[in-house]
Image (tube, rainbow, N blue to C red):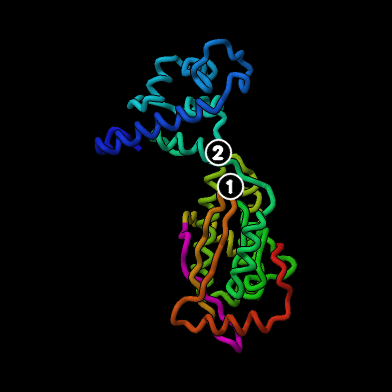
């Protein structure tokens, strides 16, 4: 974002926010936190500007201009140095980058467990399908409705793999080729977001070897895809279930996404879904 192109009032708001933000974060870091003596006669509750500048390897005047919100050229490395000194949390670091007119840094992918609140959401979403995937599209939490609708069995732990190798699920997907191309495009876009992660390349290579259909689509180089759309599945003897699907990021688990599905209006899916899910005797366990 080129800050110089913002309207004058927007630039003024940004400067005020930068000034207030950096001052507040500087005030909460004490000299003892960074291994410095407090000294006598200190009126500043936290670090002084010159102390932040020295610890971050910056000139005092330059840091002062930054804190004042002046329109100066600033790099991501410099902002990260300031963020380290001020001990900013990931969300605060992102906020600092945005205030400075830079793209926020990419969050480090998380490997922790799915929060209990998200698991309760999956359970509360019933009888509608919902699940959580990690950055490699591995399903790490899923509710019973999603297991039934997407016909997951004990071997289905990855959305991409299932779409191409689960014959029963593939046969149920309406307009499978377009759905497959969209998913491959989203997977390729995700791979580009993590260029230092070899897991994407390994999975793509394995899929090319296991599925000629995947190999053909992968060679077409599709990129991107919607974060919301429609999914339709045909169930013999029951009918077609059509869902509006929305994919949401999970900020507490960078790289993970929550996929929620609701019956598309006017399709009769809600009544069919009730019959399908309520009549199934399977467990309500949400663990993948």
Between 149 and 4, the one lying in front of the other is: 4
> Image height check: is 195 above or below 41?
below
Q: Which mark is residue 121?
A: none
Q: In which quarter of the image is the C terminus?
A: bottom right
Q: Quadrant of the N terminus?
A: top left
Between 277 and 37, the one lying in front of the other is: 37
Percent across and percent down for residue 63 are: 43, 20
Between 149 and 178, the one lying in front of the other is: 149
**According to the image, label 1 marks what residue?**
254
Is residue 211 at all visible to an observer of this figure?
Answer: no
Percent across and percent down for residue 5 are: 27, 36
Q: Residues within 10 Å of mark 1 (few under 14, many from 20)?
A: some
**According to the image, label 2 marks what residue?**
90
- The residue drawn where x is 53% and y is 22% is 46
Range of the magenta residues? 225-239
Residue 191 located left or right of residue 111: left
Marks 1/2 in contact by CB < 8 Å: the verdict is: yes
Percent across and percent down for residue 120 are: 64, 63
- The residue drawn where x is 49% and y is 38% is 94
Residue 106 located left or right of residue 5: right
Mark toward the start of the polypeptide (1 vs 2): 2
Residue 12 located left or right of residue 124: left
- Residue 234 on the magenta span: yes
Where is residue 23, by image quadrant? Answer: top left
Q: What element carries label 1?
A: loop
Residue 226 located left or right of residue 33: left
- The residue drawn where x is 36% and y is 28% is 69
Q: Which of marks 1 and 2 is in front?
A: 2
Q: Residues within 10 Å of mark 2 (few under 14, many from 20)?
A: some
- Residue 135 on the magenta span: no
């Amino acid at each position: 974002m080129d800050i110089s192109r913002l309207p004058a009032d927007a630039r003024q708001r940004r400067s005020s926010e930068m000034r207030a933000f950096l001052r507040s974060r500087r005030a909460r870091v004490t000299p003892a936190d960074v291994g410095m003596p407090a000294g006598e006669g200190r009126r500043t509750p936290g670090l002084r500007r010159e102390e932040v500048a020295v610890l971050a390897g910056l000139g005092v005047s330059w840091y002062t201009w930054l804190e004042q919100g002046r329109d100066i050229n600033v790099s991501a490395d410099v902002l990260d140095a300031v963020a380290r000194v001020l001990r900013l949390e990931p969300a605060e670091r992102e906020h600092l980058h945005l205030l400075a007119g830079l793209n926020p840094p990419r969050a480090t992918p998380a490997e922790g467990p799915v929060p209990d609140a998200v698991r309760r959401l999956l359970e509360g979403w019933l009888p509608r399908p919902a699940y959580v995937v990690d950055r490699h599209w591995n399903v790490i939490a899923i509710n019973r409705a999603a297991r039934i609708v997407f016909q997951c069995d004990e071997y289905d732990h990855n959305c991409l793999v299932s779409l191409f190798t689960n014959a029963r699920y593939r046969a149920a997907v309406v307009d499978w080729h377009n759905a497959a191309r969209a998913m491959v495009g989203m997977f390729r876009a995700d791979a580009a977001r993590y260029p230092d992660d070899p897991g994407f390349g390994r999975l793509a290579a394995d899929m090319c070897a296991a599925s000629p259909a995947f190999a053909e689509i992968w060679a077409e180089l599709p990129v991107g895809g919607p974060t919301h759309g429609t999914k339709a599945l045909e169930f013999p003897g029951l009918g077609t279930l059509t869902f509006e699907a929305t994919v949401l990021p999970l900020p507490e688990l960078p790289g993970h996404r929550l996929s929620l599905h609701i019956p598309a209006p006017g399709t009769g899916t809600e009544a069919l879904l009730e019959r399908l899910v309520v009549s199934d005797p399977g467990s309500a366990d949400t663990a993948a």
